Amino acid sequence: MTQGSPVHEPYTEASQQHEANMLGMFIFLGTEIMLFGGLFAAIMVYRIEHREQLIEASKRLYLWIGTANTVILLTSSLLVALAVQASRAGSRRVGATLLVASACMGVGFLGLKGIEYAKEWQEGLLPLTGVRHAFSGPVQELFMGLYLAATGLHAVHLTIGIALMVGLSWRVGRGSLRLPQKALTVELCGLYWHLVDIIWIFLFPALYLVR
Amino acid sequence: MTERHIPETDVEKVSYLRAGHSLRSWLLTTDHKRIAILYLYAVTFFFFIGGAAAALVRIELLTPGGDFLTNEGYNRTFTLHGVIMVWFFLIPSIPNTFGNFLIPLMIGARDLAFPRLNLLSWYIYLLGGTLTLYVLVAGGVDTGWTFYTPLSSMFANGNVVAATVAIFIAGFSSILTGLNFIVTIHTLRAPGMTWGRLPLFVWSHYATSLILVLATPILAITLALIAAERLFGIGIFDPSLGGDPLLYQHLFWFYSHPAVYIMVLPALGVVSELVAAAARKPVFGYWFVAFSSIAIAIIGFLVWGHHMFVSGQSMYASAVFSFLSLAVAVPSGIKVYNWTATLYKGHISLDPPFLFAMSFIGLFVFGGLTGLILAMLAIDVHVHDTYFVVAHFHYIMVGGTVSAFFGALHFWWPKITGREYIMVWGRLTAIFIFLGFNLTFFPQYLLGYLGMPRRYHIYDPSFQVLHVMSSLGASLLGVAYVLPFTYLFYSLRYGKPSPPNPWGVTGLEWTTPSPPPKQNFDQIPVVTTGPYDYPVEMEDRR
Ligand code: HEM
Ligand SMILES: [Cu+2]
């Protein structure tokens, strides 16, 4: 798959190096899943402990923004998958364009998320110190805390993903990342992007759809 | 034994130690052996900081009154002791020094899979460590190493945020190391180095790494939530919002029980190597010992609730956790039985590393058995949060892991530095550590059983005798821990140059010169035999 890519120090064969990079990435993604796993555990526990109030609290979220963002991220993942195909085929122009496009969708996601936060801020629904609070009850504040922690952490990940995509498309476009020999690099960054997407796919129902 | 400085040998001239002399060549190295040495310096430094905190605790406990430290000062001291020892010494101790140094050598590779990541992990560790030192200077934390909410999130007034951030950062260093080890063991084994030929040290590091990558992120998110509560007011564990402090405990122990195995599994790996070397026999029941590490890693994830028997968790949950905790002792037991069977009828060498290994076995058995006692629901209600628990985990983490650390240091020292130290001193140290350790911690079992609660510094005068014994033992232990510095550093200048295989044992690392060259092997070796192919021919020894 990556014939011709240079073999670096501890490795003796290209296949070995390829396997190591893939495995390393998958293990890293595993750690990311565990990281969010703690938050999902908390969301689940509180959903069991405060079922009714949690459902009430969830109704205050902007379902349409959440849905729009889900569509955006899913589409961006498709673009990334296509970019991986393109880089395997060695088409630099297409690859670079697709990567930029997915980064733009990521930015779009963050923009919408920002609008959503701003609205919630105005309504007094963000449980930050020094903000006017307008919670219907303690559990709503708890829920909004979880919401903010989980979506905030996700946004941080997405920001990193966007930076990766922009950097990657720059290097692919300029040709400093040689394709198809280095298609693995695109593939690995793509895997990260998919993971950020998948985490959202789970956050969306856990926060927005429990109503 | 000569008193004269022995100049650099030809082997040393071409070794990894001389591949670049500048500070820069050390600080920017990607050689796993040099990074191991960087880690060795760093963890030793933190070991002595943590030790200093322990000394303060033991001084305070000499008398029943609170006359040396204030209440708050005492809380901050034992918290710092716990935090530094757990995250900045025990967890990185064996994996990041000996694991780093030995895994590539043992599997016949030139380096770890991601050498630059390896260096990065050291810098991340240092960053976390520096922040911890800042916490120390800024006045400390008083929550205990467990950071229980709501104390840590709402009431504690120390530097909780800085401390949690420091541990959060150090966690990433653990994750990177674990990831690196797993990938290395999967992809960089030399031709013929099948899984069944891996030294048991490598198996136990594989199991450790699984825990490192799976459990550490949970700690990270849990501590991050505490920091978020203190910084931004996002109260996820806040009881007044319906938040559940028990959820915190579940998350914390879901990491921290597996983490105790992060601390002991590498030690078990060291001892498997040392036992085979001491008896000069193949390890009895290789596959059982190998898979018991994996079993420990898996079952270790299922027992966290035994820390919460009196927290008010469901009785049914407690019963299940109690049963599973008994089960997790089985693979540990298998190891001990198999080591004993390995030693049986062997010509057991009592050179320093092996003395450490023997004392490990004894102390580990004692700590493990008292773990079983604690895992019994009814007894735990009585001894929970007493010195019995303190003694239990110190037998395993200090008696066990720290002894194994010193055993490893004495065993692989000639390989790492190319010099031999004076054996008598090593033997004396091993014996002093064993005696000092038992004098320090055995009385704590009695104290706990009699009802002395942990984390208190004002106590009933009837406990004083045992506390004084413990403090005396701690002084002996402290001296014994400093001793190796003298003769090991002495050996660097005056020690006899070591042959490639000074102990006459098996293992690919012993086929390289002492100290090894930068690239480890001129030719990647082809492995044709199992890991403990004894007896070793005499001419192979030199
Ligand atoms: C043989 C299997 C083991 C069993 C069945 C076991 C059981 C237990 C139990 C039931 C407790 C809770 C006692 C209480 O708080 O009331 C405990 C505490 C503890 N154990 Fe073990 N243990 C085992 C092995 C280990 C190992 C291998 C280590 C470390 C390397 C370890 C370290 C600890 C620590 C640090 C604590 C106290 C944590 C704290 O509250 O600060 N244990 N153990
Ligand atoms: Cu435990």
Image: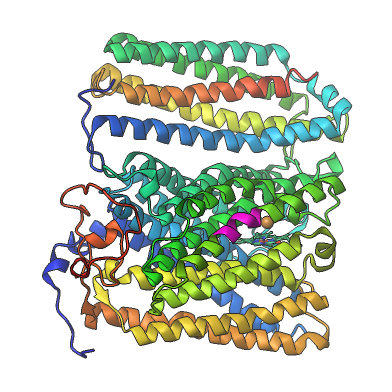
Q: Residue furthest front?
A: B345
User: Which residue is located at x 36 percent, y 87 percent?
Assistant: B424
Name which quarter of the figure residue A156 lies in.
top right
Asked if A45 appears above or below B315 in the picture, the reply is above
Q: Is residue B372 above or below residue A168?
A: below
Q: Nearer the viewer, residue B538 or B273?
A: B538
- Identified at 47% across, 53% down, the residue is B204
Number of numbered discs = 0
For residue B439, side relative to residue B110 (left or right): right
Residue B442: tell me if it is visible: yes
Nearer to the camera, B239 or B357: B357
Question: Does the segment drawn in magenta span residue A135?
Answer: no
* Quadrant position of residue A6: top left
Q: Is most of the magenta stretch helix, strand or loop?
A: helix
Q: Is residue B330 magenta?
A: yes
Horizontal side of B500 relative to A83 (left or right) equals: left
Q: Quadrant of ligand 2?
A: bottom right
Image spot of residue B163 (x, y percent): 60, 57
A128 up-or-down from B323: above or below: above
- The quarter in which the N terminus of chain B is drawn is bottom left
Q: Position of residue B120 (x, y in %)?
A: 38, 48
Across and down, in percent, residue B88 comes to 51, 61
Asked whether, in this view, residue B494 is left or right of residue B67, the answer is left
For image coordinates 58% across by 68% down, the residue present is B364
Q: State which region is magenta.
A: B328-334
